Image (tube, rainbow, N blue to C red):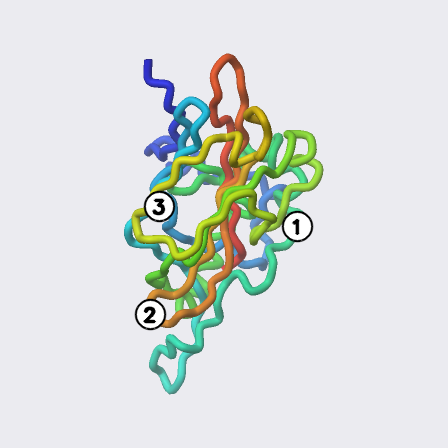
Amino acid sequence: MDRRSFLRSSSALVGGAALSSLAGCFGGSGSSSPPPRRAQVFEGVSLDGRQLQIQFVSDPRVESRVETTEGSLAVGQLSPVGVASAQKGGGGAARGSGAYGSAPRGRHGWAVWHGGNNDDDWRENHQDELRMYPAMIGAAGVAYLGSDQRYEDDPPDAGPVPWDKKWENQQDGESHTVPLSEAAPSDAPREGWYRVGTKLVGEESGADFGWQGADFEIDNEGTWQIDKAWHVRPRV
């Protein structure tokens, strides 16, 4: 039996119905807050038994607002996302519970923290400021964030956390296999919430785009499986 628990996107998950969200939880149509940035970082995150498997894309991309000088793109003057921490609220405290079912979905079918109804409108109004940049994964890490109750009470913002395992100078398309007992250092695997984070830097400019991550819940119901997953990114 195939015991790998994959997190993959599907046309049903990323269709129009899945992109709708509750205004009270995810910013609402009247919100002027920028949406979470877009990025292409993870090829997939999966479980094979008690082994956490992380696969990065071979061509990372990250969205940022830019400045221009005399009408030409000043790549060295990026206004990089991730400098300011994402705000709590609007999908913060409830991130691990009821908000998951109504959250918009990203390219893997993962829920998008701070995603909202007005994201497309905001991008349309700021389209001249936005670019997708080639990026490199300067570092990556895995951390155990705690039990389901602890995570629901105080989910961490987008950004770095105290990593239980960390890698520097990642290669494009690189993959890692991490036993759960190392991802959450203990004598035995632990249920609860985990984060896989990546620090992105501009491939050409060297701009610091800060950290983003994927938070996911791991349960043991006879077999170890991933139950929920969130894209947790700074606002663009």
Residue placed under numbered mark 1 in the picture: 88
Residue 45, image x, y percentages: 40, 36
Within 10 Å of disc 3 (Cα), the crowding (few <14, some 14-19, many 20+) is many
| Residue drawn at x 28%, y 50% as measured from the top left | 58
Can residue 82 be seen in the rendering of this structure?
Answer: yes
In percent of width and height, residue 17 lies at 43, 34
Instruction: Give me the residue at 33% from left, 18% from top.
Output: 2
Q: Is residue 37 above or below residue 194?
A: below
Q: Nearer the viewer, mark 1 or mark 3?
A: 3
Q: Quadrant of residue 77?
A: bottom left
Q: Is residue 59 above or below residue 96?
A: below
Distance Cα–Cα, label 1 vs label 2: 32 Å
**Would residue 235 appear left or right of 64 to someone viewing this image?**
right
Measured as percent of width and height from the top left, residue 165 is found at: 51, 44
How far apart marks 1 and 3 lie (CA) works out to 27 Å
Disc 3 versus disc 2: distance between alpha carbons?
19 Å
Element at label 3: strand
The first of marks 3 and 2 along the sequence is 3
Q: What type is the residue that disc 3 sits on?
A: Phe
Viewer-side residue, 83 vs 206: 206
Left or right: where 18 falls relative to 193 = left
Dot label at residue 204: 2
Q: Which residue is mark 3?
A: 56
Q: Nearer the viewer, mark 1 or mark 2?
A: 2
The N terminus sits in image quarter: top left
Query: Which badge, 1 or 3, is on the more N-terminal residue?
Result: 3
Q: Position of residue 206 (x, y in %)?
A: 40, 70
Dot 2 amino acid type: Glu
The residue depicted at 51 percent of the width and 42 percent of the height is 142
Q: Which label sits on residue 107? A: none
